[in-house]
Image (tube, helix red, strand yellow):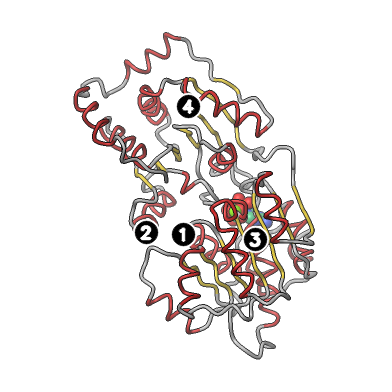
Amino acid sequence: MKFSDYNIADEIKQQLNDLGFNKPTDIQFKAIKHILDGEDVMAIAQTGTGKTAAFAIPTLDRIYRNKNKYKKSGIRCLVMVPTRELAKQIAKVYQDIGKKTNVKTFGLFGGVEQEQQIRTLDNGIDILVTTPGRMFDLISQKAIVLDNVEFLVLDEADLMLDMGFAKDIQDVMRFIPTKRQTLFFSATISKKIKSLAYDVVKNAIRIQISPKNPVAKTITHTILDVEMDDKRFFLENIIKENEEKKMVVFARTKVRVERIVAAMERVAISSEALHGGIDQKERFAILERFRTGENKILITTDVACRGIDIPSVDCVINYDLPDNPENYVHRCGRTGRGKNRGQALSFCSESERELLLAIEEYTGDRIDRYDLSQGEYYEILNDSDDGSYNWKKLIEEENKFKGTDTEW
Ligand code: ADP
Ligand code: MG
């Protein structure tokens, strides 16, 4: 089936064609018809399989068709997402797909000034894509009215529930008419979240693609045994051997991210840090420089592990293994998107063995180990351009950071 065969508005079909979307992906094929039929949907599908358009196409179509019939203005579709980067990205997908329609989408998030956002909301929008914090703030200021919402979409829904927003989501549902469609999308769903999720979408059609293995098939996975203190030399080596490649490097905390950027700088590798401690405008600019390729090495925390869609990422490096096995799937999912192939390489130190076991248990697969002889291992250490590094300074730096490190 092609998009041209669908019962959706011509303006949307033409635009999908212009965007190069001809055939629906698996999840789009399975979800769109139910959403058009007015049903609630809970969809679990691997990273990079086109979940955004799976909810954006049918919700846009419904709103566009009814736009002239609506008696009152107001927000028709509320899309809630866990990070600011994602709010911006998903609003853009709606704007792109809806380009030939008169449907207005707005991406709302914290960390930037409110005045302009309130003005845009006052002028009237149809679709609001937002992070919970700023949304609740503006609801309490009466700048957001949800009386006319027909669609509630939760993307990366499991994380939204897990971040402690479960009660907030229940609360927000009280502001939204009970006669609405609820759409729940994620790549993973943990046992812990399942019952909460079923409370949110009660009689939903459940669609799960490849339920046994949440890991995208387009990604090759490898583990490299590296001692904690040697990780930076290995990262240096990998980056220098793959100069042209675009990589996302995940580390456990903000401070570790900054340290890795500094360590790379010492060996003349330019990279940029992205984490929750950086000013929001700068965060967007950093992501944009990575998107355009101006910067090829993005070093980040789990703040960037969900949903970010940059099609040309060649490789994900887990400099530190994630504490939460689901985040392994999400981090690796930043590469190998759509039909592209990608590589995921994870450093595993002695102290991270248990995390690795938890990941393998979760994904149901043993990940291949990179076979490195002791000789090769030491050669990588010796090859480093960081030989002149002053160990005393390193210890001082270590002490300075001690006790100040926080997550994301
Ligand atoms: P997910 O949310 O499942 O991780 P996204 O919705 O971010 O994935 O989509 C991944 C990529 O696939 C995006 O770059 C998007 O433009 C592309 N894409 C989505 N649907 C189609 C389609 N039907 N045809 C071609 N490309 C598509
Ligand atoms: Mg997504």
Above or below 6: residue 366: above
Name the secondary structure under disc 1. Answer: helix
Q: Can residue 297 be seen by looking at this rendering?
A: no
Name the secondary structure under disc 3. Answer: helix
Where is residue 199 drawn, in percent x and y? 71, 59
Mark positioned earlier in the residue sequence (1 or 3): 3
Mark 4–mark 3 Cα distance, whole angstroms, equals 34 Å
Mark 2–mark 4 Cα distance, whole angstroms, equals 29 Å
Specify the quarter for ligand 1.
bottom right
Of circles 1 and 3, the one toward us is 1
Where is residue 403 drawn, in percent x and y? 31, 37
| Residue picked out by circle 2 | 280
Look at label 1 and name its amino acid: Arg
| Residue picked out by circle 1 | 84
| In the image, the residue with mark 3 has its CB under 8 Å from the nearest atom of ligand 1 | yes
Above or below 67: residue 197: above
> As drawn, which residue projects farthest toward the bottom?
71
Above or below 94: residue 189: above
Callouts 2 and 1 close, C-beta under 8 Å: yes
Mark positioned earlier in the residue sequence (2 or 1): 1
| Residue picked out by circle 3 | 53
| Residue picked out by circle 4 | 347
Q: Residue at x 78, y 70 (%)?
A: 38
Name the secondary structure under disc 2. Answer: helix
Above or below 26: residue 405: above
Front residue of this view, candidates 15 and 308: 308
Mark 4–mark 1 Cα distance, whole angstroms, equals 28 Å
Where is residue 398 drawn, in percent x and y? 27, 30
